[in-house]
Image (cartoon, helix red, strand yellow):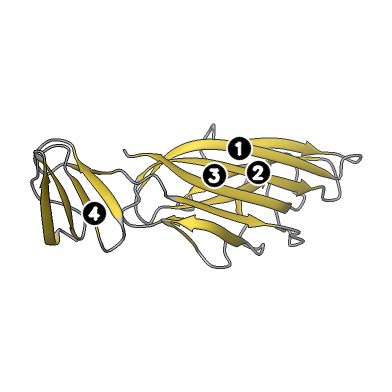
Amino acid sequence: MATSNLISKSLGGVLQESGSGSPNHTSPRGSTYTDQSNGIIYLNIDGSTSWVDINKNSYGNMYVSGNTTAVTGVTTNTWYSLSGATWSGSSNSGITFSGGSDILIVNSGREGKYLAVANGRINRQTANAVYQIGFSINNGTPSDGFYHNSSTSATETTSSISIIGMFNLVANDSVQLSARNITTTNNILVSEASLTLLKIANT
């Protein structure tokens, strides 16, 4: 939504402004504008109509604990959603946790570069196997460099995996964790996991 109900006050050559909707009007470079509909603050960077969101408080977290629901019918080297587990969301601002599922969604006006950090604990399922956990963007296949692996064995009942990455995300982009078994068709049981998104820059 374009700017409406604009209020401006001059402060030594720049403007402090507020209104409803994201800014699309001309103001002196260095002016600030607050969108009263969502509290997002913008900075004018060119003395014309170019504005950037300077809010850094977009973040989201979700986790699953004590999960006993395994992904079954596994095909080797195939990525699977972990939505069968019961996920919880906490500490979310500008990121929507899709209630009860395994997805974090970027809200409108919170576009930017995000740091993603995740971990998961996989329980051994009947035999030795090598598992991977990765970031799935918009239900896509995790890209190279955005997944890690660990193995389980007859003497190792659980195995932990941690991953970190950075993504450019826009409104309504979703992020979730996916897992796969790359050596066997054994079930995938992620008993503990968490995913955190933190906006670190505008794009």
**Residue 63 pos. (x, y %):** 63, 55
Q: Residues within 10 Å of mark 4 (few under 14, many from 20)?
A: many
Element type at mark 2:
strand
Lateral position of residue 22 relative to residue 143, left or right: left
Numbered badge on residue 192: none
**Label 3, label 2: how far apart the Cα atoms are:** 11 Å
Q: Is 93 left or right of 72, judged from the image as shown?
A: left
- Looking at the image, which is closer to me, 102 or 75? 102
**Placement of the N terminus among the 4 image quadrants:** bottom left
On the image, numbered disc 1 is attached to which residue?
163
- Front residue of this view, candidates 170 and 82: 170
Q: Secondary structure at mark 3?
A: strand
Q: Are marks 1 and 2 in contact (CB under 8 Å)?
A: yes
Local secondary structure at mark 1: strand
Which of the marked residues, 1 or 2, is nearer the chain's N terminus? Answer: 2
**Residue contact at pointers 3 and 1, CB within 8 angstroms:** yes
Task: Look at 53% across and 56% down and name the residue there.
Answer: 91
Q: Position of residue 107 (x, y in %)?
A: 37, 57
Indicate the position of residue 121 as horizontal and vertical percent values: 73, 46
| Residue 119 tag number | 2
Residues packed near mark 3 inside 10 Å, few (<14), some (14 to 19) or many (20 plus): many
Q: Which residue is mark 3?
A: 135
Question: Dot 4 lies on which element?
Answer: strand
Decide which of tag 2 and tag 4 comes sooner along the chain: 4
Query: Pointer 4: what residue?
Result: 34
Task: State which quarter of the image contains the C terminus.
Answer: top left
Q: Is residue 7 left or right of residue 124?
A: left
Instruction: Compute the Cα span from label 1 to label 4.
Output: 35 Å
